[in-house]
Image: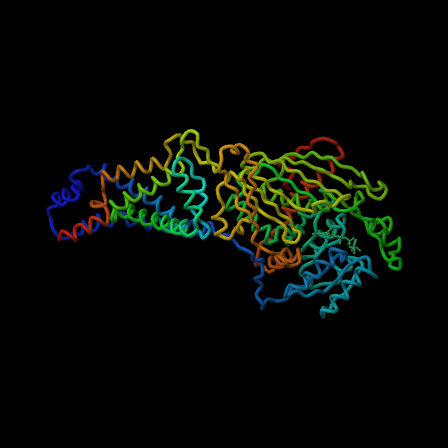
Amino acid sequence: MDEKMDDSRTTPKKGIERRDFIQGLATLPILGLFTLSWLNKTIHDRPKNLGKSQRAIPEDLSDINVAFLGTGEQGYIILNACLKIPGLRFKAVCDIWESYNQKRAAQVLKKYKHEMNTYLDYREMLSKEKDLDAVIIATPDFWHADHTVACLEANLHVYCEKEMSNTLEGARRMVEAARRTGKLLQIGHQRRSNPRYLHCYNNLIKNAGILGRITAVNGQWNRAVQPDIGWPKKHVIDSATLKKYGYESMNQFRNWRWYRGLGGGPIVDLGSHQIDIFNWFLETQPKSVLASGGTDYYSKDTHEWYDTVLAIYEYETKQGVVRANYQTLTTNSSEGYFENFLGDQGTLHISESANRGGVYREPTAPQWDKWVSLGYLSAPEKVTQQITTRAVLDVRETIGPDRHDIPITFNDPYHLPHLENFFNAVRGLDKLNCPHDIGYETAVTVLKVNDAVEEARRLDFDPKEFRI
Amino acid sequence: MRIDKKHSNWQLAALVTLRVLVGWHFLYEGITKLMNPFWSAASFLLESKWIFAGIFKGIAGNPSVLSVVNVLNTWGLIFIGLGLMLGCLSRIATVAGMGLILLYYASNPPFTGLYYAIPSEGNYLIVNKNLIEMAALFVLLLFPTGHIIGLDHLFHKLRSK
Ligand SMILES: NC(=O)c1ccc[n+]([C@@H]2O[C@H](COP(=O)([O-])OP(=O)(O)OC[C@H]3O[C@@H](n4cnc5c(N)ncnc54)[C@H](O)[C@@H]3O)[C@@H](O)[C@H]2O)c1
């Protein structure tokens, strides 16, 4: 009180002057600054594209003319997903298995009133079909390079299934052709467009840094024992045609994945999807890989590639070293397939499979209430037990971490958003989520595992290897 | 020219800066709690150690008391923050701020022999940032500036007109 009276004595002038307003309101701009900073932070922290897949196709755009090259198991799945995308006209189907896979695809397209031609040979298709805009390639891996390069050179945009190629030389030719022709080349690592994966990368890892420093990664794809893929006996392809397209037998034509020179075995077939996610989420490529594998279970005559592979990568990220192990088994399906990212503040468990996933907070990490309220995570299922006595203080592992769901469900066909991304890019509305450069980086990363198994030692990557 | 007879302009600027910074901190702590529907003082209170632990844990254990405490704490932080930042009712804001921080400190003091499950972001022995902020407010109580730079100056002028 004294000071106040003091103060009135020191300011003898009565009445409010301009100066008094300045003194009285001097700190008001700081409130403005505060509000601005707060709004800025709110906008920054807001999750991006939450739950939305790229569905922004204007209706009045002209149709894209599309061809299918390879309509086997995967080609057929992609074709069905494409039928859900507006603005596509299917003009051609090419497959060397005329009486079976080619026929099945053509029948479906006819049912949906698409007028198209069928071809056995891709060169014939490319020389006859003159108004194609884009092609979807889902032939066996060893054909990807030839098919992609020919289509790009015929001025088509290309969606090519993974693995980009079974050889680095093939993958390199694809990158060079894409650069030379300026056409789009999307590689079919479809998780790159999956809204759940996009949320995990953009919001949880990049924006919120919710895992803290990622120190380890593990992933797997375990499959149960499977017999060789067969074929209906009345739909055998004659051996001259098989030879012409690089197959020695019907069994090899159907089970190409297991043969050297045609596929890359399960590590390439399955692992490439998930190891691609390692690179994506860690924002870099590995420094080295060591691996152990072999054809331990199946006959080496029909399974030239390894049926079992365990690989360990070493990454050097901006935050430090990350060790990542990946395993693929074809003799046991325990736990199926997933990727785990382990950080000092939390764990991200994610899989393409049926909305499987979760995020776990380390008991010692700061609370995640904020991220829950922002919609990054759903509310925790189990609240951390509180330690109330000193007796258990050093036994931190007794506290189970909170489990949060990834608050995005995705019930469309797995490949749909990646295809939409491709066709949107063709229309100039979007950028490719998995362009050739990324496909190449992943091919380099994955193909080296087979070399490491072969050489039975740790192999280093030269950073230059990943670029062309 | 001196703005105020009792302080040099630098002294005044330093005091006002201190006041605004503490106010900013209070205001943001309050606003984040207001914007977060999941925020509750419960986990903090349940962690309470030392002689008042019984009282604080009791609050956390009683949902109706807890919800009142949550609201009081949130709005308390916001009003104290605004008061300090704008120099509005600054004496009340200063005293209330000290009181609130005293409660935080008493609930989880960094004393030898007390261990907390949630690690703090630094290392403290007896003195932690709460205590320092409380001391800063004590300085502001003894060297008030709201009536010189702040809305209190205008109120004061209006009253003495
Ligand atoms: N993205 C994914 O999730 C995913 C899943 C499965 C397969 N794939 C990829 O899709 C591709 C195809 O795999 P699939 O399981 O469908 O194999 P598949 O053997 O079932 O199908 C391959 C098809 O290509 C045809 N074909 C082979 N050589 C040809 C040629 N030279 N010209 C024209 N047609 C030819 C075959 O007749 C067959 O219909 C592979 O690259 C595979 O890695 C991707």
- Way the structure is coloured: rainbow
Q: Nearer the viewer, residue A35 or B77?
A: B77
Q: Quadrant of the N terminus of chain B?
A: top left
Where is residue B35? Give x, y as percent.
Answer: 42, 52
Q: In this rendering, does residue A39 appear at all? A: no
Which residue: 60% across, 60% down? A427
* Residue placed most toward the observer, A167 or B82: B82
Q: How many marks do you count on the picture?
A: 0
Q: Is residue B17 left or right of residue A4?
A: right
Above or below — where is A211 with respect to A63? above
Measuring from the top left, give residue A441's x and y in whole percent: 64, 43
Q: Which residue appears farthest toward the bottom when viewing the image?
A: A113
Taking A85 as reference, is A344 above or below it? Answer: above
Look at the image and tell me whether residue A299 can be seen: yes
Q: Is residue B3 left or right of residue A353?
A: left
Asked whether, in this view, residue A9 is left or right of residue A259, the answer is: left
Res A278 → quadrant: top right
Residue A12 location (% of width, % of height): 10, 46
Q: Nearer the viewer, residue B70 or A55?
A: B70
Most foreground residue, A57 or B99: B99
